[in-house]
Amino acid sequence: MNAEALAFYALAAMVVVGGGLVVQSRNLVHAAVSLVPTLLGVAGLYVLLHAEFVTAIQLLIYVGAITVLILFVILLTEGATGLRVPQRNEQVPLALVVSGALVLLLWAVLLRVPWGPPAGTLPPYNPGAVGRSLLMPYVLAFEVTSLVILACLVGAIVIARREE
Amino acid sequence: MARLAWLIPLFPLVSYGVLAFRGRSLGERAPYVAIGAMALSALVAWAVFLEQALGAEPFVWRAAWAVGGERVITVGYTVDPLSSITVAMITLVGGLIFVYSVGYMHGDPYYARFFAFLSLFCAGMLTMVLANSFLLMLIGWEVIGLCSYLLIGFYFRRRSANMAQMKAFLTTRVGDTLMLIGIMALFWQFGTVDYHAVFESVRKGAKEASAVVRLGPWEVPVVTLTALLVFGGPIGKSGQFPLHVWLPDAMEGPTPVSALIHAATLVAAGVYLVGRAYPLFFFTPHHEALVWVAWVGTLTAVMAALIAVAQDDIKRILAYSTISQLGFMMAGLGVLGYTAGLFHLLTHAFFKALLFLAAGSVIHAVHTNNIKEMGGLWRCMPVTFWTFLAGFLALAGVFPFAGFWSKDEILLEAYHHNPAVYVLLTAAAFLTALYMSRLVAYAFFGRYRGPEHPEPDPWLPEDYERAGLHPPGHGHHHRQPHESPPVMTVPLVVLAFFALVVGFVGVPGTGPDGGSWIHHFLKFEGFEEAGIHAPSFSWPLALRSLAVALAGIGVAWVVYGLRWVRSEQVRAWIGPLYPFLRHRMYIDTVYGWVFVRGGLALATGLRWFDVHVVDGLVNLVGWVTVLLSRLHRLFDTYVVDGLVNLVGWATRGLGSLLRPLQTGRAYNYILVAAAGVAVLVLVSLWRL
Amino acid sequence: MIGLSHYLVLSSLLFGLGLYGVLTRRNAVAILMGIELMLNAANVNFVAFTRFVDPTFVRGHVAALIVITLAACEAVVGLALVINAYRHLETVNVDQVDLMKG
Amino acid sequence: MPILTITLFLPLLGALVVLFLPREDADRIRRVTLGFALATFVASLLILPRFEYGRREIQLIEQAAWIPAVGIQYKVGVDGLSLVLVLLTTLLTVLSVLYSFREHHRVKEYNLLFLLLETGMLGVFFALDFFLFYVFWELTLVPMYFLIGIWGGPRREYAAIKFFLYTLVGSLAMLLGILLLYFHLPAGQRTFDVLEILRQRPLAGTGLLAQLAFWGFFLSFAIKVPMWPFHTWLPDAHVEAPTAGSVILAAILLKLGTYGFVRFSLPLFPEVFHQHALLVAGLAVVGVIYGALVAMAQTDLKKLVAYSSVNHMGYVMLAVAAAAYAYGRPELADAAATALNGATMEMLAHGIITGALFLVVGVIYDDRTHTRGVEDFGGLWAVLPKYGAVSITAMFASLGLPGLMGFVAEFLIFVGSFSIIPVFTALAALGVVITAAFFLWTIQRIFLGPTNPRWAHLPDLDRREMWTLVPLVVLMVVFGVYPKPLLDIINLTSSQLVAMLR
């Protein structure tokens, strides 16, 4: 087992355990905090996959921003997120069966597909390549995304603003 | 000059416009606008009339007004002897009444409005007379109806005036609707409503076999039915039986209005129309439409004269007298006396306007309408008395006043063409002299009795306040009535003059070939074609009618003047006839019950029907739908009705079956979606 | 040697966990966290495919970046909605919000 | 310049502009709305010089592909009938918006809905594609629903829902009819183009299907008109709607029904319509008499005017039924054209007169007395001379006084229809007396007699109210005295229709 494999399994364990805690904790604050190792683990996987830029963004946005945001909201709406209220609905067994089945089936499919060898090599300077791709072939997607961000920004302000 | 005839109605119309928009600021000067316009219009009218009298050709002008497919409906005016002499009469009488009104209406808070409505009336009346088609005639006809409505209710604070104006408009409207249907029938038969074209067609059509309509057991020729429907308008407007009920009530209006509208012009419009549309009546099989006209007229003449004898209100007596005289005119036209009827129309306009104005002068002085509260007025109101007397003699038909000549013409025609009508009309003439003498005797002779309850002011103090006037004080009128100011008496004198002389156009020898001028001027061409000749004047007949008139005066003088026989005794002799006549033969009462209350009851009933039945059905449908949806849980227990639309039930049933699945909770839906994805993955696994 | 399938197995597992969270949680914020897990799983897939199947134009990276951006947007709007709903309904439990019930 | 499209979408543009105005600045919203309404009116007037007065067919056609796969296109055009109705719409919208300056509740939404409504109404008159027509037809429904439901009187929800459901049921029936027509075109040539469908008359000779489609259209239009016995939504809607809403409802929306009858039912199903013409005429006569009698028994002024609408629209339907009955009898062509001219004239006259009447009621109710009970008034003429003059003129116009617009219409309807269905027409003419009776009675109770001291100091019409009412009165008089300019335009369409019915 080389260093890469070791890293992978460690990160995978981090992700899975974190994810499990996220969906399983009764305390929502715990769940939100457990999100951090999961997202960090995913970031680590990106490093293993030579996706430095994505890693950076993952750290900045997910770990830095979204997690904090979620925590804030949990604290803001504490009366409704506390331990006294039941946190699970009545379809737990069914959900367990369905999601378990889905995972198993996906595995069955993924492992059977013969993925061929890579059709090229990764560009050496990763952020530059990403930038070129974003601004040349995918510029439309880029623009649309920025528009969506704008709309979200406005929408979020409108929705969350306290009405006079 | 005939080309300028369109100016005749235009002047009063402009005057109306000015007074309607600027009347308030004109204030006291408002009448000058109206009188000036009438003077200009009279000038043109008399010029046109004299031109026609000197033998000018009739003139017609048309312009397109509406279109329907390829057809064009025109309006325009026609100048011929009949229309020109009528407009000359209207502008003259109208102008004099305008002048009189300056005095009569002085100090009224709605002074300008009064003259505005009078001007509009004259515009409408002149339009109606000059019109060259049934369409324009109808327009003028309804406009004068509107003005009559507005002027009857001029004292709009009075409930009685409000009721009277509605009664007038609605009663005439019944006749107008019949006439409208008649005009529709004309359009149907001839495709036009132009006088000339219609009359040409009926003249030609008279020689051919005419189409008939079945009305129950009777077969009526279409032309006759059309003519009679058109006659519905004159029946309403000219107060003929059975639509005469509005005219006596119309006396609620100010007296100049009664003089102008309800004596001289508007009510004569019906007679004028029958004269104008004479071919329509004449060219029916056996002139049968004219026979109807004659009998309606005769009946009206007798009935109204009878009622007039038992009335006490001076204006009502004159109103019933007007109805009766209009009946005379209709009867005259009906017994083939085309000239006679129209001649009486012209003379009657002068002397009846005179009588009303003089009556107005009396009312102005004594503040009551009841002749039994007057008396002895000949001494304190000499001008009014003498002019009234002139009008009285003209109406009674005493030689040489105008009424003698024209009424005699009618009796002469009736004598030759329809003896039964002649007898009845003679009786009516006797009654006319009787009730008029009664009126004169009560009002002008004896001693002054004075009103117990003087007529209250028609206006409220607030009306004067708004107009910036001071309400007239109470008790300022003298114990002894006094003569009216010259602005009112001068028109009386002028009209009295005409009441004396206007009949002379009917004196034999004034026209060519020894006939009278009026016969020469106003003649109906159809008579010559049909070989009918007007009977010539005969002295025995004239003397007989004069004797009848004098007899009427004599009888009245015996009872009411000299009081040899007390009127109470007369009442006792005639028994129930007196209350019958006094209550206007109960005609108004019956109409009130049948039409007014009946109509309102029907309306109320239909409103109930609308809310509870028609709308109830709609609401029932809605209610049932709501109920069904409320009961959806019990739906399964319902026994499915075989008649009910199976598809509808099935859809509904399927809906309720699927209903529990729609929980509205997102996580249920997502679970299903995830399971679906799992199934899809499973399928793809198979295919690998 | 860690290959593509390792990553794919891991990401499917993560996806399953997220899905389970979404399906069972009553609380809207918790559901949102489940969604975040699922999105991360997808992103791992994208990046892994770039590395092992189609590396030339780093298309997967671009897709992952866009997903991250949209995830951020979604979180922002979602949380705004949660706050708004909480203010109005005094609850953020989705089973009490059943306006879609047929 | 695509003048029709500009006219059609100017109000929509206005609605967009209003959407972006701050709701606090009510004054600016009102002025902008009025500006757009005026601009639309001017644009519709600009159609006049472009219109060819010698051509009977639909002209000034503007079209563009929309959904070519199923034969739907954007196609608009005008002929005499739609031109005059478009002018009526744009004018009355201007006056309604002007009147609504007094509205203070949710001004922005109110004005926005009005502009939206105008586009809907114009679209119905302009559309030459059944799909487009249907879209606009439904579009008129929504703003009106909200106008009644939000700005209405105490029972507004009931009235709004009744109005909505009733007319919706009708439009669904029409949709069925449209689809029947569409699917009877030969496959491959299927289109919603009105002119093409009119040319081919796909359901001619299909018996039952033609009947079905005819009654589908009939139900939709009859509810809109409204014909007896589908009229009960009208009084409720009128009573509850805000004044300007009532004006538009009476003046324009009712005309959509009669417009539909003339534009579609007559030329599409002449045989079927001919077959049922006497039934329709009978319903029309019942509407005339019944409407007048029920109006007489009303004590609420708005209800009274509403039932008088039932009465007047009965005349229109009488003329349409007469025209249908004349199908196949060329000798009656001119009479049928006269009747149709009268019907169109009555649509305009009723729009102008009843519009004025609702404004008159609104003027006294909204800002002065807050009561509409006929019995609560009396002697108002002395207090409000200008108001009295305007109201009495409008009422006399409504009862068909010659010299005013209503008479022209009634006269043409009567003389035209009498040549075709004399008995029905004569019966309907009797309605004239009843109409006169209830209007006179109303005048007496409101304007004559002693003044109720409560109203002794009411202010007379102010300048804005004069500006809304005077144009209508002027039009009543002008076209009452000389209707030929209008009739020349209208006659083009009537002649064309009659030619198609030969």
Image (tube, coloured by chain):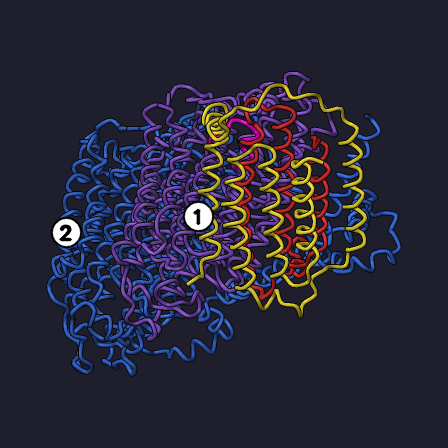
Chain colours: A yellow, B blue, C red, D purple
Q: Residue at the front extreme?
A: A2
Subunit bearing disc 2 = B
Count of numbered badges drawn on the protein: 2
Along the line of sight, the residue nearer the viewer: D11 or D500: D11
Residue beneath disc 2: B33
Residue beneath disc 1: A154
Q: Amino acid at mark 1?
A: Val
- Name the quadrant of the N terminus of chain B: top left
Subunit bearing disc 1 = A
The residue range painted magenta reads D125-136
- Name the quadrant of the C terminus of chain B: top right
Residue B616 in the magenta stretch? The answer is no
Residue pictured at 32% horizontal, 50% vertical: D469
Whether residue D219 is visible to the viewer of this picture, yes or no, is yes
Q: Quadrant of residue B515?
A: top left
Is residue B430 depicted above or below C69 in this figure? below
Specify whether disc 2 shares its chain with disc 1: no
Q: Which percent across, then down, holds residue B479?
A: 18, 82
